[in-house]
Amino acid sequence: MMPDRNALANRAMTASIAARTKAGLELINPICIYALCKAHKVQVRFNAINMEGMYQRGTPSRIHLSARRPLPRRAYNCAHELGHHVFGHGSSIDELREDAKENPWEDPKEFLADSFAGFVLMPTLGMRQAFAKRDWEPNSATPVQIFQIASEYGVGYTTLITHLSQSLNMISRSRATVLKK
């Protein structure tokens, strides 16, 4: 049985704030996820492997990422794997999304790591500021505007849309569906 998603998401958001704060990073601006890993004493390695990423618990802990994935995907995968580290999960391997389990978010550890990745890369205050400083309304933003903010934060277009609708409730789910088309 899946624990309360809201409780898990709140736990992930709180952990993302603590992770940024521990590294001396602001809670608004985009970050370099690899610098955040370094601040948490987690080594990141890029390998010619066919998977999303892998967290290897140990001394030192390591994150292995596929050098074959697009840059925004690597950043998100790295943040996801850092989430496993922050929450003290054991070693894990995440297959390519196309090959992965049908509903990976039903696993509380995966949901927690995904939520952490979203909040650490796209913090609530940062998303609000990104739209406000441009005088844009999230729910009426154009695809180009969404893409601009995704690019600023180094994440994928659909990743940002999912985070804005599912985690931050800044855009409606129906608007998210339209934007993803």
Image (tube, helix red, strand yellow):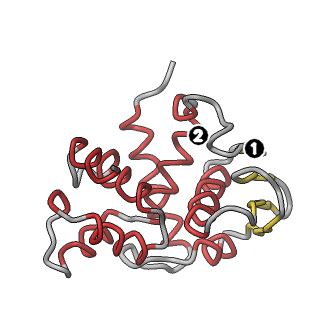
**Residue shown at the point (40%, 29%) measured from the top left:** 4
Q: Is residue 68 left or right of residue 110?
A: right
Q: Is residue 93 above or below residue 122?
A: above
Query: Where's residue 132, x and y in %?
Result: 18, 75
Q: Any mark on residue 101, and which?
A: none
Which image quadrant for residue 143?
bottom left
Q: Amino acid at mark 1?
A: Ser
Query: Where's residue 162, x and y in %?
Result: 37, 50
**Residue shown at the point (75%, 60%) measured from the top left:** 66
Query: Where's residue 158, x and y in %?
Result: 41, 55
User: Mark 2 near mark 1, Cβ–Cβ under 8 Å?
Assistant: no
Q: Which residue is mark 2?
A: 110
Q: Amino acid at mark 2?
A: Glu
Identity of the residue furthest to the front in this view: 181
**Local SS, label 1:** strand
**Mark 2 burial class by Cα count in 10 Å: few <14, some 14-19, many 20+:** some
Q: Is residue 51 above or below residue 104?
A: below
- Whichever of callouts 2 and 1 sits on the residue coming sooner in the sequence is 1
**Mark 1 burial class by Cα count in 10 Å: few <14, some 14-19, many 20+:** some
**Local SS, label 2:** helix
**Residue shown at the point (75%, 68%) measured from the top left:** 44
Query: Where's residue 116, x and y in %?
Result: 50, 53
Q: Any mark on residue 92, and which?
A: 1
Most foreground residue, 75 or 24: 75
Identity of the residue furthest to the top in this view: 1
Q: Is residue 36 left or right of residue 117?
A: right
